[in-house]
Amino acid sequence: MSLFERISETASYINEKLNAMPVIGIISGSGLGGLTDILEIETEIDYELIPHFPVSTVAGHSGKLVFGKLGNKQVLVMSGRFHYYEGYDMDTVTFPVRVMKALGVETLIVSNAAGGMNENFKVGDMMLITDHINLFPEHPLRGHNDERLGVRFPDMSETYDPKLIALAKKIAAEKQIPLKCGVYIGLQGPTFETPAEYRWLHVIGGDAVGMSTVPEVIVAIHSGMRVFAISIITDIGISAVPLKITHEEVLEAANAAAPKLAALVTELIKEM
Ligand code: HPA
């Protein structure tokens, strides 16, 4: 079965369970599933039940699609994402984005937990992603290009929608929500970086680093969606003495920052 056929099957399964078309898709990352708390939930579907959907394997990532209203718009939240380091191939990692597009989603909002390399960042900061560097070992668009899904050579000059970035900055200023901006580097993990790697990632232009987001964003651009993304800085990679990082600390820091992320995203959705 082709990718296109799988997307269609999955989308029609989900479509039957929804009473309205979602216009905004949200992928909530590690510890940031809290976005579903502020959603006026209408329908929830466990990943297990969705045809062609993989089941996520990492502790702290629950796996379900949550559909409902946020800021007066119909949104579809992917609570728990699929990471490349779990062993999924790129088609699988990005499959939910394809399905969102098939369901009518026009704007994708992505959140993640990331390590900070910018010396002005501290744990708990929220960083608006203005651009990215793709260091994944495999490209999600490698291989046959189905023109029904997008063009062979997508433009990436304005990957993160400038209007949404401007709107988020305005909202953050009005609501006095501290907001940093920067470049996200996506790589495969699952190790956190060595001190030398964090330094190198900063030198090549990164402000934050993580193990997700870039594949989903590339596929969203390929399918013609508008993209907005935010990192929660859960640890700092650059320091005079090497700092140890654990997954638990990452989840804890992400959880602590989840309310301000939710506040910003809710207002953004309201105003866009
Ligand atoms: N590196 C990579 N991924 C991460 C980090 C990090 O420091 N923090 C949270 N996710």
Image (spheres, rainbow, N blue to C red):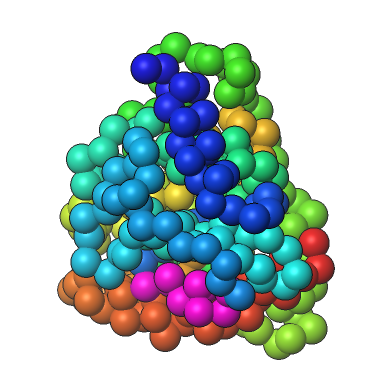
Residue 32, magenta (yes or no): yes
Q: Residue at x 26, y 78 (%)?
A: 249
Residue drawn at the location 65% of the way across and 28% of the way down: 155
Of 144 and 163, nearer the camera is 144
Q: In the image, residue 210 lies at what x, y percent?
A: 37, 56
Using the rendered view, name the quadrant where residue 71 is placed: bottom right
Using the image as rendered, state which of residue 148 and residue 247 is in the foreground. 148
In the displayed structure, does residue 189 sit left or right of residue 117? left
Q: Where does the image place residue 256, in percent across and percent down from the top left?
A: 42, 85
Pick out the residue farthest to the top.
Answer: 144
Between 161 and 55, which is closer to the camera in this rendering? 55
**Does residue 190 appear in the picture of this structure?**
yes
Secondary structure that dominates the magenta span: helix
Span of residues in magenta: 31-39
Q: Nearer the viewer, residue 64 or 184?
A: 64
- Is the residue 236 above or below the residue 182 in the image? below
In this rendering, position of residue 246 left or right of residue 224: left
Quarter that holds the C terminus: bottom right
User: Is residue 220 depicted above or below 57 in this figure?
Assistant: above
| Quarter the N terminus occupies | top left
Residue shown at the point (27%, 69%) measured from the top left: 60
Name the spot of residue 28 as percent of width and height, x first: 46, 63
| Residue 71 placement, left or right of 18 | right
